[in-house]
């Protein structure tokens, strides 16, 4: 009989440890944070993603550039920790945008080059003078490249680089 009491006490200890770990996970998830989650289920055009929260998050299949499969690990942004019905609201598109913005910011801070495509000419204060180019970057971001940095040689036909 004494052995049974010891087992019960250990079970209670395990249960309280599990509850404590569970509550700690709830504290780490905040609105706006990017998490890795596992696709748990796809029903129609709704994707359910397990991010370790009290319930699975749901998002539209249209939110993904490439449709995921059950078991895939995906990057998602927490839009709202407590959405309708207590479910966590997630977005894959916003996670990708935030990751892209972070990569661009890191490239800026470390002075690393990024690839882009010249899409249009930008005129300066004087109507006939070109000051540079609008550059299309990853993730729909736009940049500016001054004319003096566009090529190592002097550019005679400015629109040629577009």
Image (tube, helix red, strand yellow):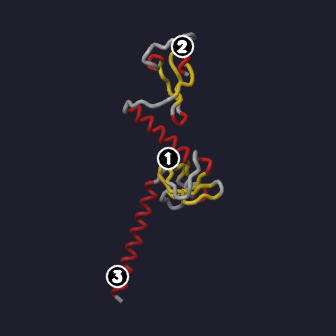
**Location of residue 51 with respect to 135 vertically, above or below:** below
Q: Residue at x 39, y 31 (%)?
A: 112
Question: Is label 3 in contact with label 2 (beta carbons under 8 Å)?
Answer: no
Residue on which the image places disc 2: 157
- Per the image, the residue denoted by label 1 is 32
Mark toward the start of the polypeptide (3 vs 2) = 3
**Relative to 1, is 69 on the left or the right?**
right
Quadrant where the N terminus sits is: bottom left
Q: Is residue 54 left or right of residue 47?
A: left
Q: x and y percent of residue 101 in the render?
A: 48, 37
Evaluate if marks 3 and 1 touch, with contact meaning CB atoms under 8 Å apart.
no
The Cα atoms of the two marked residues, 3 and 1, are separated by 45 Å
Q: Is residue 129 above or below residue 161?
A: above
Mark 1 falls on what kind of element? loop
Crowding at label 1, few (<14), some or many (≥20) Cα neighbours within 10 Å?
some
Nearer to us in this view, 110 or 73: 73
Residue at image x 49%, y 59%?
A: 53
x, y (%) of residue 71? 52, 58
In the rendered image, residue 93, in percent from the top left (x then y), is placed at 56, 44
What residue sits 61% from the left and 56% below the top? 84
Residue highlighted by disc 3 = 6
Residue in the foreground of this view, choosing between 34 and 154: 154
Closer-to-camera residue (29/159): 159
């Amino acid at each position: 009989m004494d052995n049974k009491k010891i087992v019960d006490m250990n079970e209670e200890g395990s249960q309280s440890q599990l509850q404590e770990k569970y509550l700690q996970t709830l504290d780490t998830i905040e609105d706006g944070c990017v998490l890795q989650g596992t696709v748990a289920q796809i029903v129609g055009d709704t994707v359910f993603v397990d991010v370790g929260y009290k319930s699975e998050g749901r998002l539209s299949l249209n939110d993904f550039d490439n449709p995921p499969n059950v078991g895939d690990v995906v990057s998602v942004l927490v839009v709202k920790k407590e959405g309708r019905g207590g479910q966590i609201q997630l977005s894959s598109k916003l996670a990708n945008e935030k990751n892209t913005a972070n990569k661009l910011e890191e490239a800026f801070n470390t002075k690393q080059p990024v690839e882009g495509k010249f899409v249009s000419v930008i005129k300066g204060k004087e109507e006939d003078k070109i000051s540079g180019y609008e550059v299309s970057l990853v993730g729909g971001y736009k940049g500016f490249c001054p004319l003096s940095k566009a090529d190592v040689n002097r550019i005679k036909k400015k629109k040629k680089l577009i």
